């Protein structure tokens, strides 16, 4: 809980900023080190819902796109939400696995990147550090985008960063960067 706001004692604004800061730190680091489904984010979501913390709940909704108060079990679905887009992505994933195994082993790793949805993040970047790394790697025209904008024609039709209803796939918390090499 907030103890001091740097000069004026306790106040609600400081407590709100503190809980928002704690969520942001949790959002970044829990994804890098989580060892079980949901991790500490799930615990925080359960606690926020149980304590009826509307301020933090609204902030979480802005960040990840799900209102944890509309349904007591919705915070669980935040971790493993099933939508038509995700079902379509599941079929695509199965199709890609079939292609992977049909591709000759000699070129398989050059064509396919083996990752899975929900695997632990190895690193988290902000706009500045990622832009700098991309420049060092020889990329140019590096531009931060929104979930619903891209220089790639018809990109939103693939529903990678956007849901079919036009909302962001993972809230506003993701960093979207496009660059040319």
Image (tube, rainbow, N blue to C red):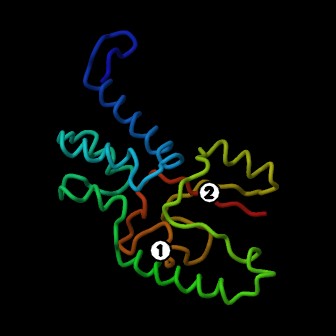
* Few, some or many residues within 10 Å of mark 2 (<14, 14–19, 20+): some
* Mark 2 secondary-structure assignment: strand
Closest to the observer, 120 or 28: 120
Q: Nearer the viewer, residue 128 or 170?
A: 170
How far across and down, in percent of the image, does residue 84 sit?
A: 36, 78
> Where in the figure is residue 3, as x and y percent of width and height?
32, 16
For image coordinates 47% across by 74% down, the residue present is 159
Give how far apart the Cα atoms at labels 2 and 1 are.
16 Å
| Residue visible at 80% across and 53% down in the picture | 137
Tell me the residue that label 2 is attached to: 177
Q: Position of residue 10 (x, y in %)?
A: 27, 16
Compared across the picture, whether 70 is left or right of 170 comes to: left
Within 10 Å of disc 1 (Cα), the crowding (few <14, some 14-19, many 20+) is some
Residue under pointer 1: 159
Q: Earlier in the sequence, mark 2 or mark 1?
A: 1
Indicate whether 160 appears above or below 41.
below
Secondary element at tag 1 = loop
Rendered-image quadrant of the N terminus: top left
């Amino acid at each position: 809980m907030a103890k001091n706001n740097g000069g004026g004692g306790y106040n609600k604004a400081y407590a709100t900023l503190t809980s928002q800061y704690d969520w942001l730190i949790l959002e970044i680091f829990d994804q890098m080190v989580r060892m079980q489904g949901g991790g500490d984010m799930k615990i925080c979501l359960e606690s926020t819902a149980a304590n009826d913390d509307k301020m933090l709940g609204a902030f979480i909704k802005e960040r990840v796109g799900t209102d944890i108060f509309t349904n007591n079990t919705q915070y669980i679905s935040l971790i493993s939400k099933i939508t038509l887009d995700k079902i379509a992505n599941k079929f695509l994933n199965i199709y890609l696995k079939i292609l992977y195994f049909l591709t000759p082993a000699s070129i398989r790793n050059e064509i396919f990147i083996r990752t899975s949805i929900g695997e632990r993040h190895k690193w988290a970047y902000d706009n500045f550090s990622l832009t700098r790394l991309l420049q060092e790697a020889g990329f140019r025209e590096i531009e931060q985008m929104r979930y619903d904008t891209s220089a790639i024609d018809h990109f939103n039709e693939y529903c990678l960063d956007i849901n079919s209803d036009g909302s962001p796939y993972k809230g506003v918390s993701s960093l979207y960067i496009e660059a040319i090499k």
